[in-house]
Amino acid sequence: MYIENSRKIHLARRPEGMPVAEDFEIVTESVAELKDGEVLVKNLWMSVDPYMRGRMIDRASYIEPFKVGSVLEGGAIGEIVESRNPAFPEGAKVSSMNGWREYFIADGQGLQLLPETGAPVQSFLGVLGMPGMTAYTGLLKIGELKEGDNVFVSAASGAVGAIVCQIAKLKGCYVAGSVGSDEKAEYLKSLGVDAVVNYKTSTDLQADIAKACPKGVDVYFENVGGAHLEAVLNQMNEYGRIAVCGMIDQYNATAPVPGPANLSLLIIKKLKMQGFIVFDHWDGYPAFVQQMGEWLQQGKINARETVYEGIASAPDAFMGLFTGKNTGKMLVKLG
Ligand SMILES: NC(=O)c1ccc[n+]([C@@H]2O[C@H](COP(=O)([O-])OP(=O)(O)OC[C@H]3O[C@@H](n4cnc5c(N)ncnc54)[C@H](OP(=O)(O)O)[C@@H]3O)[C@@H](O)[C@H]2O)c1
């Protein structure tokens, strides 16, 4: 099958501060005929994720930076529309890191066949994929969650945060979180979250977090950093754990960001603070999918999605992550 006008999105230049439309470019390519062993994949869904902002900076990190003038990469779910590889029959659904494009040819490397779970395929970019696994691993393994713990979650209505909140509730914990709108706060309350702080309307974040956590915080699931970290540190209970998942407050910073002034509380309160990258824990993925699949079937987890339509909307969806346009997992529907 010859595809003449397959669209993809290039990084046009490295963003300075908050990304803008001019940092991205839509490019059209033709996708040629297959050779033996190859498959043609039509992407159906693609993921946009905050960590991609870090890859737009030219610096050494746990993952290679994106190249200017090259197609962006990200999680995607696609369908095999033509196959010359018996391991990937036509019609099969696959996940890959070849998002930000409509079609691509692969030799099977980097493609994973999706298991039959009954869940919508795009769940493998959200609750059953990397964000869900991040929530599960960060809370249970890094945060060493125990029944009855008092938990605080920042960016609590996002792809990772909303799943963290719900797992913590399933484990019998008191859960409070912070979000950027009253609608998001209502959503979290509908999930059973005990207290929610709107950090955008709060005039005293420290006091509002203290009020939301009357028994202090045993586990802080950190997605934001900055003022949030300083405020929650003050509320941590002795021997508390801070699972540092992300610091989205700094991803668009144009100058070095000062650390919290009260970091010595780590000593005084005997706290453990650990960053993690979910891919280092991927050996736990089969057990996670089994457990999360059960919770979903039992209706115990709500997996909200915010969906943008068409590949041209991907830059807007990505930029929207930094202005709070999503509740739950931010996705782009293709095709
Ligand atoms: N360590 C890992 O392996 C790993 C894996 C996945 C994700 N992460 C990290 O986990 C965090 C959440 O990721 P996600 O995919 O679930 O994204 P997400 O929470 O679905 O989307 C980002 C959300 O962050 C909030 N936000 C944006 N800028 C903010 C700011 N300056 N201060 C406070 N809140 C802000 C917005 O919600 P509001 O309306 O509430 O502001 C926005 O909707 C990110 O920091 C990400 O980098 C880490």
Image (cartoon, rainbow, N blue to C red):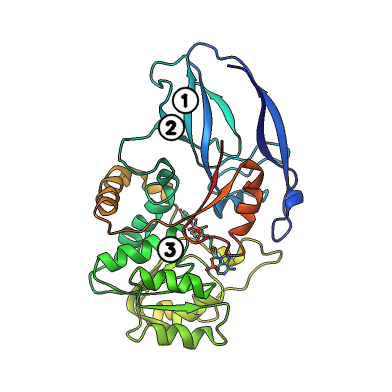
Q: SS of the residue at dot 2?
A: strand
Q: What residue type is labelled 2?
A: Val
Q: SS of the residue at dot 1?
A: strand
State left or right for residue 183 relative to residue 67: left
Q: Residue 267 or 19: which is nearer the viewer? A: 19
Q: Residue 214 or 268: which is nearer the viewer? A: 214
The answer to which quarter of the image holds residue 255 is bottom right
Q: Which of marks 1 and 3 is nearer the N terminus?
A: 1
**How many C-alpha atoms fall within 10 Å of the one at disc 3: few (<14), some, or many (≥20)?**
many
Q: Residue at x 55, y 35 (%)?
A: 98
**How many C-alpha atoms fall within 10 Å of the one at disc 2: few (<14), some, or many (≥20)?**
many
Are the residues at dot 1 and dot 2 in contact (C-beta closer than 8 Å)?
A: yes
Residue corresponding to mark 3: 161
Q: Which amino acid does label 3 sit on?
A: Gly
Residue 185 visible, this orientation? yes
Residue corresponding to mark 1: 80
